[in-house]
Image: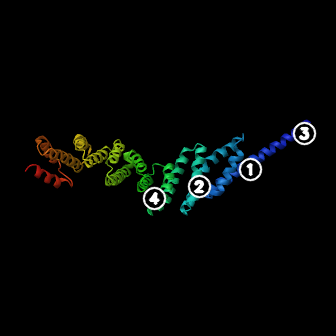
Amino acid sequence: MKKIFVTLFALLAVGFASAQSEIIAKFNEGATALQSKNYTAAITAFETVIDKGMDSEDSKVLSCVTTAKKYLPTCYQGVGLTAASQKNYEKAIEYLTKAADTAELYGNTTAKQKANMILAKVYQVQGGEAFNAKNYEAAVAVFEKGYKANPRNTEMALNLATSYCELGKYDEGMAIYDKICKMPADKYAAAIEKAKSLKTLYTNNKVASLQQAGDFDGVIAMAEKLKAATPALAEKIRIEALSGKKDYAAVVASGEAAAAAQATDEEKSAIYFLVGAAYNAQYNAGGNKDAALRDKAIATLKKVIAGDKVEAAKAALAELTK
C-alpha cells in the first residue's frame, strides 16, 4: 500500500510540474508575441496564463500571472489602436474599453487612465465626423461616451457642449461649458476662453429667441441660473429683460450693481445707457416735471463713453438739456 501511495504522489508531482511548465511556456509565448506587436496572440497567451495559473501556489507561476495581468491591458490597447488607425471605430472602442476595464480589474490605475484617454480620442474622431456634418444628434451620442471616458479632453468637451446647444439643449450645454471654465487656468487657458466665448454666444442666442417671443420672465429666470457662474453676463441679460418689460424702477434699482459687474467700458456703457433710458422714461411718464429724475438721467447717460450706444446717449442728452 505504501508503494502505491508513493507512486501516486510521484505521478501527481510529475503532473504538477508539467502544468507549471505549460503555464510558464505559455507566458513566454505571450511575451514574445507582445514584443513583436502580435497583440492578438499575446492576448490569447496571457489570458490562458491568468486563467490556469491564478490559483497556483507556485511562486514562478504566480509571477507569470502577475506580469500577464500587467501587460494584458497593453495588448487590448494595441489591438484597439490598430483598429482605430484603420478607422474601424467599433473594434477600436471594444478593445480600448476592454483595456480600461481589465486595467481597473487588476488595479492598474495608470493603464486605465491611458486606455481611457485613447478611447476618448477615438470617440472624438468618430463623433467629429457627425459634428462636421452638423448631425448634432449623432455627435452627442458619441461625444457623451468620450466625455465619460476622459472629461479632460477639452476639444471634445467643447464640441459636446456646442452640439447640445445646437440641438436646443441649452442647460446641458451650459453645464459642460461651466465645467471647462472651472478647470485649472494654467493648463487649459485656451479651452476656458473658448468655453466662455461660446457660452456668451449661445446665451445671447437663447436670450434673443426668448425676447422675440416676448418671454422676458424667461430671460430673467435664465439670468438667475447664470448668476453664480457668470455674474457679468447674468446681470447684463437680466437688466435687458427688465428694460424690455418696461419695469423701469427695477432697471434703476439694479443698474449700479449690473454696471459694476462688467469688465469693460463698452459693457458698462451698455448698462448705463439702459439705466439712463429708464430714468428718462420715468421723467417722461411724469409729464417732464420731476427735475430730479431728469438730472439722474443726464448724469447716467454721461457715463456712456464707449461702444455702440454712445451716439444714442448723446441724442438723448441733447433732448434732456434743451
Mark 4: amino acid? Tyr
Look at 66% across and 43% down and name the residue there: 63
Disc 2 versus disc 3: distance between alpha carbons? 53 Å
Circle 3 sits on which residue? 4
Disc 4 versus disc 3: distance between alpha carbons? 76 Å
Can you tell which quarter of the image residue 238 is in?
top left
Q: Earlier in the sequence, mark 2 or mark 1?
A: 1
Q: Is residue 277 left or right of residue 175?
A: left
Circle 1 sits on which residue? 22
Disc 3 secondary structure class: helix
Mark 2: amino acid? Glu
Residue 265 position, x and y percent, is 21, 49
Circle 2 sits on which residue? 94
Q: Please name whichever residue, 161 or 12, is drawn nearer the observer in this view of the structure.
A: 161
Q: Please name whichever residue, 303 or 313, is drawn nearer the observer in this view of the structure.
A: 313
Determine which of the numbered discs, if any, sits on residue 136 in the image.
Answer: 4
**Comparing labels 4 and 1, the label whose residue is closer to the camera:** 4
